[in-house]
Image (cartoon, coloured by chain):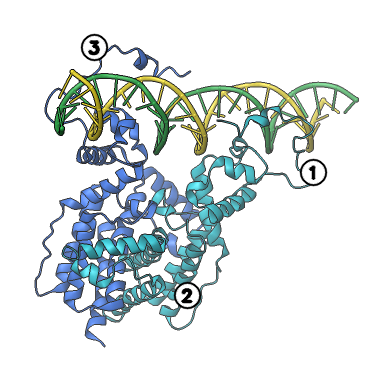
Chain colours: A blue, B cyan, C yellow, D green
Amino acid sequence: MGSQMKNDGVRSVWLRPRRASRGEPPLSLSRIVDAAVAVLDEEGIERLTMRRLAERLGVVAPSLYWHVETKHDVVDLAVDAIFGDLTLEAERTSHWRKDVTAVLYGWRSVLLRHPWAAAVPARQRPSVGPNFLAQMEILQATLARAGFTGTALSAATWALYNHVMGSASTETALHITDEERRVGQEKLRSESDRYPTLAAQGYLYDDDWDGAFATGLDYLLDGLEAQLTRP
Amino acid sequence: MGSQMKNDGVRSVWLRPRRASRGEPPLSLSRIVDAAVAVLDEEGIERLTMRRLAERLGVVAPSLYWHVETKHDVVDLAVDAIFGDLTLEAERTSHWRKDVTAVLYGWRSVLLRHPWAAAVPARQRPSVGPNFLAQMEILQATLARAGFTGTALSAATWALYNHVMGSASTETALHITDEERRVGQEKLRSESDRYPTLAAQGYLYDDDWDGAFATGLDYLLDGLEAQLTRP
DNA sequence: GATATCCCCTAACAATGTTAGAGACCTCGA
DNA sequence: TCGAGGTCTCTAACATTGTTAGGGGATATC
């Protein structure tokens, strides 16, 4: 019954951690964001708590609110931070397909390295941090250079965005244990009269996500290319 | 300060709602799911709580746990339920593109009518309820009939799935007030040196989501068609 | 040396998902 | 008719969460 915070109240001054022995302050926005990314990577998004985050920084939860307005801010900042690892130099070869592909594979690598990230835009709000906007700029500039304009450009951008984000998010959300997969397969097969195609095809077991991503992307790019050469 | 649940404790037996005057029991799985969909539609996903859900059913929260194991179950069931409105009869015209398009627009209409739904698969787990599986079966059967097999079939299915889900989820997550949009536009324009293409293009303001969805889908289908006619 | 500002602290709050366990009601066999 | 068991809802409580109110120490500024 409420036994977990009692001793904190009695903690004597001598044992209290002295304000960060020297130099750098214990807290700063960038330290918070770095710690948040670490927690998210190691423990997943549903384990990211203001208290856990604070603990990792040697601080208590309310202290974070001096630097941050809300927990959503932390997550938004974390998402944007991981896109900061990507290059800002768009490739500019003579093959726009290659250039676009390079950008998107960069995104994908980020999203797979930080499996919690793909779901965030759907969860609260599409990212509009500087790092992500920079990536969007690169993508759209590449497409514009390829010849897309107006609504075609907009549609192409969103289609590619959705493919990358959607693939990563379903893939990471579907990371299921082999056991669960076996059970699901069993169940699907037992109802193969209702789902004949799914059962035959092995829906959800085939886990060649990289292949599915690449092939799907090729479909999309084929369609985009056709749009360019046609009208 | 804690004034909203106090009178419940004193509520006399006479005022206590008598076990559903007659006939149907107050609770059942399907009544719970229906109520959940209603709450989600009216108040959004972050306002769906077990207590609110229970209240709508004239019941208290713990009672729900007799029928349901966890809140995730409720949401999963709600997602599957709304796909139950769709037809189970796949169209079988001679144009597979039309048939596929019909299926996907059905999905889209469901997701737009229930704007909370698109984010759920990313949030917790892709839907594998019977209604949604039935829709997947229809889609994949249609594609199979069109000539796709093996990994191509799988990639096509996921690409289309991601396009529909991704579009709906970014679109609903991005439903921003005009004010927010204006501010964002302002900011982007003020940094147009950093994001020249985005600023020129009007990234995030152009809100012709239907157009973007349709055009993007056409790109994808063009690519798929090319794949079919080629080897 | 006083004052203000910055930054972290303790304490507490309301809200949430969920569990433990009591008891009302119904069914059914003896 | 009685009682046992099952079905379902209740009250009570818990731990955990995001967040706020406000105290107070350190540091800079005059």
Q: Circle 3 is placed at which residue position? A: A14
Report helix, strand or loop for mark 2.
helix
Q: CA distance from mark 2 to mark 3?
A: 71 Å
Q: CA distance from mark 3 to mark 1?
A: 66 Å
Where residue A207 appears, as percent x and y from the top left, is 31, 54
Q: Nearer the viewer, residue B195 or B58?
A: B195
Q: Nearer the viewer, residue B165 or A64?
A: A64
Is residue A207 positioned above or below A100 on the image? above
Q: Nearer the viewer, residue A197 or A156?
A: A156
Q: CA distance from mark 1 to mark 2?
A: 45 Å
Where residue B152 appears, as percent x and y from the top left, is 31, 68
Location of the C terminus of chain B by quadrant is bottom left
Q: Circle 2 is placed at which residue position? A: B102
Q: Are marks 2 and 3 on the same chain?
A: no
**Direction from residue A57 to residue B121 in the image, left or right:** right
Q: Please say whether residue B25 is visible from this viewpoint.
A: yes
**Among the 4 quarters of the image, the one containing residue B6:** top right
**Amino acid type for the residue under numbered disc 1:** Ser
Q: Circle 1 is placed at which residue position? A: B21
